[in-house]
Amino acid sequence: MNIPKEVTIIEVGPRDGLQNEKNPVPTATKIEFINALKAAGIKQIELTSFVSPKWVPQMSDAKEIIDACLDSERNFVLAPNRKGIERVYDTNVKHVAVFVGVSSSFNEKNINKTTEESMSELQPIIKELKEKGYFVRACISTSFYCPYEGKIDPADTEALCSQFVEFGVDELSVADTVGMANPHESYELFERLHNKLEGKVLITGHFHDTRGMALANIYACLQAGITRFDCSSGGLGGCPFAPGATGNVATEDVVFMLEQMGIRTGISLEGIAEAVDLIKPHISRPIGSKMYHLTKQTM
Ligand code: HMG
Ligand code: MG
């Protein structure tokens, strides 16, 4: 099998991991968490999101997080619309993530627009961001299944991804929002995207682990030539507008699997466990990852 020597992990814990957490997490704790993740070797990271504080109160301290944590690596902030982009322009952020669902029903629940309306709004925004020198990542939700519409046709996901590439994005983060994809479906979709778009855009897998299939899906993606994965330390995460979805695949579980396979990640398991220790008292559900608990036993 053609296995890569190195894989890039994009940490989404401070954003995807926390946005679904009902209890407000103190801003100072979020900052400590992010600093600890960076100390553990994380370079690419979603710091927070510029969304409506009424829709997602947990992200209302986005500006303070950016002011405290932004460094010269790929530090992403999510922005769904023009207002979010205006907020980006008030900071030194240079890496922006936009997000759209393949399923229009999901998109309406998540951003209050149809997929088509979101794409029409984003096209000129992405053009403008690229002209200003920003790195743009497009997060593609419900790429496999939708909590409202059921199974998604891979051709629809491919079409939306291709449209984003035409708009000029640098990266596609292709998401199994509800954690329903199986390894066979993951291989098929990512091979298709890899064959069509490799060289034109970075392709990243984003798996929620609702049914315990995320690691198997990542292994399937490796075989399809994918070398970039979004992960969340402690397995935190979920979208408030995707009922039934649990956390992202845990960074530490992915790092362990890859390193055991001889694939470098540059990330320390002990360092991630220390970061999870900081955030754990503020999280309302148990830490479900395997390697957090095992690493703690040997520290
Ligand atoms: P809306 O209510 O239709 O917005 O929400 P609006 O344009 O009508 O504006 C209403 C109010 O919100 C106004 O304020 C605006 O200024 C304000 P008011 O006059 O009432 O005081 N507003 C904003 N404030 C701050 N930042 C903004 C912003 N935009 C408007 N950017 C909106 C539309 C998009 C704002 C809302 O639906 C929203 O914030 N949605 C975000 C939902 C979200 O964060 N979801 C989770 C992230 S996506 C995800 O997790 C999936 C992913 O992980 C991949 C996967 O797993 O699938 C990426
Ligand atoms: Mg997600």
Image (spheres, helix red, strand yellow):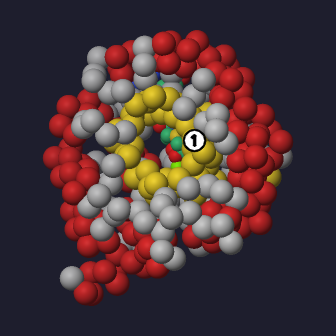
Would you place residue 64 above or below residue 145 in this image? above
Q: Nearer the viewer, residue 76 or 276?
A: 76
User: Looking at the image, which residue is at 57% across and 41% down?
Assistant: 202
User: Looking at the image, which residue is at 74% across and 53% down?
Assistant: 191
Q: Position of residue 181 (x, y in %)?
A: 70, 61
Would you place residue 154 above or below residue 208 in this image? above
Residue hosting label 1: 202
Task: Work out whether residue 101 can be spotted.
Answer: no
For residue 264, side relative to residue 112 (left or right) = left
User: Looking at the image, which residue is at 44% across and 73% down?
Assistant: 259
For residue 229, side relative to residue 22 (left or right) = right
Quadrant of residue 126 within the rendered picture: top right
Q: Nearer the viewer, residue 142 or 96?
A: 96
Q: Secondary structure at mark 1?
A: strand
- Figure quadrant of the C terminus: bottom left
Quadrant of residue 170 within the rendered picture: top right
